[in-house]
Image (spheres, helix red, strand yellow):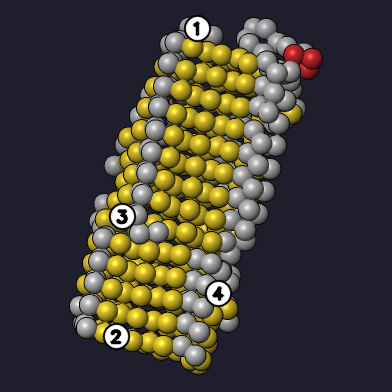
């Protein structure tokens, strides 16, 4: 195929044809095609809402695939890539509003996936059963994106791997206002596995992680690095971390957090509220059957917060808190060399080191 630009009209279109707004609910399909170079999807009317429009690309190959920022995928509309092979960057720049969807499934990328979409108002952008193995700096670069107003960004049953800097990297991309960033049954591997540059997890946003593997190249890098200005993390014991460090760092009070490190081996785990003036509630941090060199727990001032280390080898543990209320710190069946505990005020709370 020598035609490399698909112009999508308001209602949809196919180069060299365009369709008027009356042609809404049009589904444009590219099936079993080979593009000698790249393919770019553009809007004939920049940022005009597309209603009921479908863009489907399946069983096809290209170098680059680019969904331009001029695409406004709105109510009832969708983008779907199935069984795509791309040898250069795939860019998802389209914006999704009003319960629209984007899907990349059963595909193979050997360069990089770039996401700079707005995914808002109940929309869903999913990477499913897709493999990205690359030597590029990023397997997936998420920049200048926004996930807001009860929307989803999902990585499901996928592999994102690079021999270079970051498997998944977020910068200038806000998760907030009832939206979820979901990682399930997925492997992320690189010098750094999952990394947020700056405070990307904000009030009302949730990072939800299940049955996934995070692998860093050495102890000098991170399996997971999350900055939050509010927001929540829900990471249970079904996940595994190998090598590297884990840092969860919040510059605003955060409630209802769960972080479980289970059957993993990392250099250090760092959970911190930046100020003891931050009152956090219902936070649980568990280190179970794991090997950790340094464990830093600085949860601010806590209410109904519980931290437990069990059956693990932790060389050094530091616990620093403000006012502890109705909270617990328990270590059992732990081996290590140093344990440091400091709290300004402790009310109706317990700390115990048992069988260690």
Q: Is residue 178 above or below residue 87?
A: below
Residue identified by numbered label 2: 353
Q: Nearer the viewer, mark 4 or mark 1?
A: 4
Instruction: Tell me how far mark 3 sits from mark 4, CA to CA.
Output: 26 Å
- Which numbered disc flags the more N-terminal residue, 2 or 1? 1
Query: What residue sits right under mark 3 in the picture?
Result: 240
Specify the label residue 2 is tagged with.
Answer: 1
Is residue 164 visible to the viewer in this orientation of the structure? Answer: no
- Dot 2: within a 10 Å radius of its alpha carbon, few (fewer than 14), some, or many (20 or more) residues? some
Query: Going by the image, does 211 lie left or right of 284?
Result: left
Cα gap from disc 2 to disc 1, whole angstroms: 70 Å
Q: Regarding mark 2 in the picture, which secondary structure is present there?
A: strand
Place residue 59 in its image quadrant: top left
Distance, label 4 to label 1, CA atoms, is 59 Å
Residue at (34%, 63%) from the top-left corner? 261
Looking at the picture, tell me which residue is in the foreground, 141 or 335: 335
**What SS does tag 1 mark?**
loop
The residue carrying pointer 1 sits among few (fewer than 14), some (14 to 19) or many (20 or more) residues within 10 Å by Cα, namely: few
On the question of residue 162 being in view, the answer is: yes
> SS of the residue at dot 4?
strand
The residue under label 4 is 281
Q: CA distance from mark 3 to mark 2?
A: 25 Å
Give the CA distance from mark 1 to mark 3. Answer: 46 Å
Task: Give the label, 2 or 1, closer to the camera.
Answer: 2
């Amino acid at each position: 195929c020598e035609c490399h630009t698909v112009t999508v009209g308001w209602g949809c279109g196919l180069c060299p044809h365009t369709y008027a707004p009356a042609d809404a609910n049009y589904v444009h399909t590219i099936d079993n095609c080979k593009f000698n170079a790249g393919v770019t999807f553009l809007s004939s009317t920049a940022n005009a809402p597309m209603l009921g429009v479908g863009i489907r690309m399946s069983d096809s190959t290209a170098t680059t695939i680019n969904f331009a920022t001029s695409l406004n995928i709105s109510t009832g509309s969708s983008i779907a890539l199935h069984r795509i092979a791309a040898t250069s960057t795939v860019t998802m720049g389209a914006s999704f509003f009003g319960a629209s969807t984007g899907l990349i499934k059963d595909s193979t990328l050997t360069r990089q996936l770039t996401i700079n979409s707005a995914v808002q108002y109940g929309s869903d952008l999913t990477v499913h059963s897709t493999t990205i193995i690359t030597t590029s700096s990023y397997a997936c670069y998420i920049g200048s994106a926004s996930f807001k107003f009860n929307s989803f960004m999902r990585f499901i049953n996928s592999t994102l791997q690079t021999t270079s800097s970051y498997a998944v990297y977020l910068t200038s991309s806000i998760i907030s206002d009832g939206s979820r960033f979901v990682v399930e049954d997925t492997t992320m591997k690189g010098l750094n596995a999952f990394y947020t540059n700056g405070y990307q997890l904000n009030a009302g946003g949730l990072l939800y992680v299940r049955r996934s593997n995070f692998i860093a190249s050495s102890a000098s890098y991170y399996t997971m690095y999350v900055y939050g200005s509010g927001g929540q993390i829900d990471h249970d014991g079904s996940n595994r971390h190998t090598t590297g460090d884990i840092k969860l760092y919040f510059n605003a009070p955060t409630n209802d957090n769960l972080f479980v490190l289970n059957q993993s081996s990392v250099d250090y785990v760092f959970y911190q509220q930046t100020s003891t003036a931050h009152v956090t509630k219902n936070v649980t941090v568990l280190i179970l059957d794991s090997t950790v060199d340094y464990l830093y727990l600085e949860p601010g001032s806590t209410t109904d917060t519980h931290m437990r280390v069990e059956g693990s080898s932790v060389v050094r543990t530091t616990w620093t808190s403000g006012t502890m209320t109705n909270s617990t710190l328990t270590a059992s069946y732990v081996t290590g060399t140093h344990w440091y505990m400091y709290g300004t005020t402790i009310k109706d709370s317990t700390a115990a080191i048992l069988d260690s």
